[in-house]
Amino acid sequence: MARNKYGRRRVLVTGGAGFLGSHLIDRLLDRGDEVLCVDNLFTGDKSNIDHLVGHTRFEFMRHDVCFPLYVEVDEIFNLACPASPVHYQHDPVQTTKTSVLGAINMLGLAKRLRVPIFQASTSEVYGDPEIHPQTEDYWGNVNPIGIRSCYDEGKRCAETLFFDYLRQHDLDIKVARIFNTYGPRMHASDGRVVSNFIVQALQGHDITIFGDGSQTRSFCYVDDLVEGFIRFMEAGPDVHGPINIGNPHEFTIRELAEKVIEMTGSTSKLIQLPLPADDPTQRQPNIGEARKHLDNWEPKVQLEEGLRRTIAYFADKV
Ligand code: NAD
Ligand code: UDP
Ligand code: UDP
């Protein structure tokens, strides 16, 4: 299978200069693969891959996945897409294009090469869910015309494309529905709740709770998530998903804020700001499918330990 003259596997990671992509690349390089990182640096940052510059098995290509890409690889991880509400709402048309055109181009590439392709889908495909916890057979409750729709519907359409390439072209697809993930290399200013609260606490600023803080999320530490990605790609040609990957421990946003204050020893106060439109009230993955198909995968790093590592990362930055 390996195309490289040294017999190594060559892996394409789109969105590889981002938060999740850069951690995935570290894992792939650690196990001996060659990695081609394709990223247009819209939300990604070269500082996430700085430590890899000069690595003999790493290559960076600045490219927008909305345009065709002709390269030779053995596996594709398609992660390119802005992920935080602040980022994906900045240029919503581009967000939909990235999800849809990016999926078409990467699927076309996988079809030409006949190689497996992984899609970073999202719990947002469930919208504001009426089923709790969310199982993969739930079709979701998504507003098609709201401010989150560019992301939610873009990712839903990408899933459709992946399953049509499976049905029509017998492609080995792997669709993962990722739930909120956190850890080092999150953007300090992309508005996501874990990074926001940690940075606010470290700087002694008010902690901004949107709404009354009773909405819930389930936070997965990045290393656990990447382990799930690797196992999914290794799961063989009959495992296509969609598979939820996330941590099933659910917390209210207020509980998260209180935990961050306690762990940083901050004197910051909690303040309430208006809840953004279409903000889901609850979210928790059912990870039965992941356990079943991904060799009993489940998260190992619990919130307190993950927050400790993430706080240490931001303490160096701010
Ligand atoms: P991120 O913003 O840090 O990374 C996304 C990367 O994609 C960035 O480096 C960005 O520059 C790149 N990119 C964006 N548009 C591109 C384009 N048109 N062409 C090439 N590169 C492009 O976000 P992340 O948290 O690392 O998310 C990675 C993937 O995982 C995304 O697809 C996201 O939707 C998905 N996801 C993430 C989470 C999470 O909690 N972090 C949850 C669900 C799904
Ligand atoms: N494509 C690509 N790299 C490849 C092969 C295809 O970027 O190596 C893109 C190309 O832009 C094409 C898209 O993938 O439009 C879909 O390819 P597919 O073969 O499925 O469709 P078709 O070319 O028949 O429209
Ligand atoms: N949130 C908050 N304060 C912030 C940032 C986010 O209360 O400073 C809330 C937000 O309204 C949402 C939850 O935290 O209910 C998670 O937000 P995030 O943007 O991290 O992810 P998503 O909504 O996409 O799950």
Image (tube, rainbow, N blue to C red):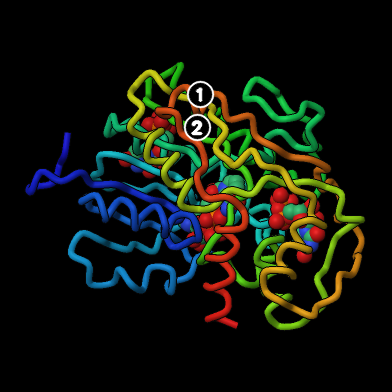
Ligand 2 occupies quarter:
top left
Extreme residue toward the left, this view? 5
The mark nearer the N terminus, 2 or 1, is 1
Using residue 67 as the reference point, say whether residue 304 is left or right of it: right
Seen in the picture, residue 263 relative to 20 is either above or below; the reply is: below
Kind of residue sitting beneath label 2: Val
Question: Which element carries disc 1, helix, strand or loop?
Answer: helix
**If the image is split into quadrants, where does the C terminus sit?**
bottom right
Amino acid type of the residue tagged 1 in the rendering? Phe
Residue at coordinates 89% horizontally, 70% vertically from top-left?
271
Residue 91 horizontal/vertical position (percent): 68, 60
Q: In this picture, is 306 found above or below 245?
A: below
Mark seen at residue 16: none
- Out of 74 and 110, give the one closest to the viewer: 74
Q: Which residue appears at 71% of the width and 43% of the height? A: 250
> Crowding at label 1, few (<14), some or many (≥20) Cα neighbours within 10 Å?
many
Q: Give the x, y percent position of residue 180.
A: 63, 48
In the picture, measured across the screen, residue 13 lies left or right of residue 18, that is: left
Residue 292, placed above or below residue 44: above
The answer to whether the residues at label 2 and label 1 have Cβ atoms under 8 Å apart is: yes
Residue 163 marker: 1
Q: Residue at x 33, y 48 (%)?
A: 12
| Front residue of this view, candidates 34 and 282 | 282
Mark toward the viewer: 2 or 1: 2
In the rendered image, which residue does mark 2 sit on? 175
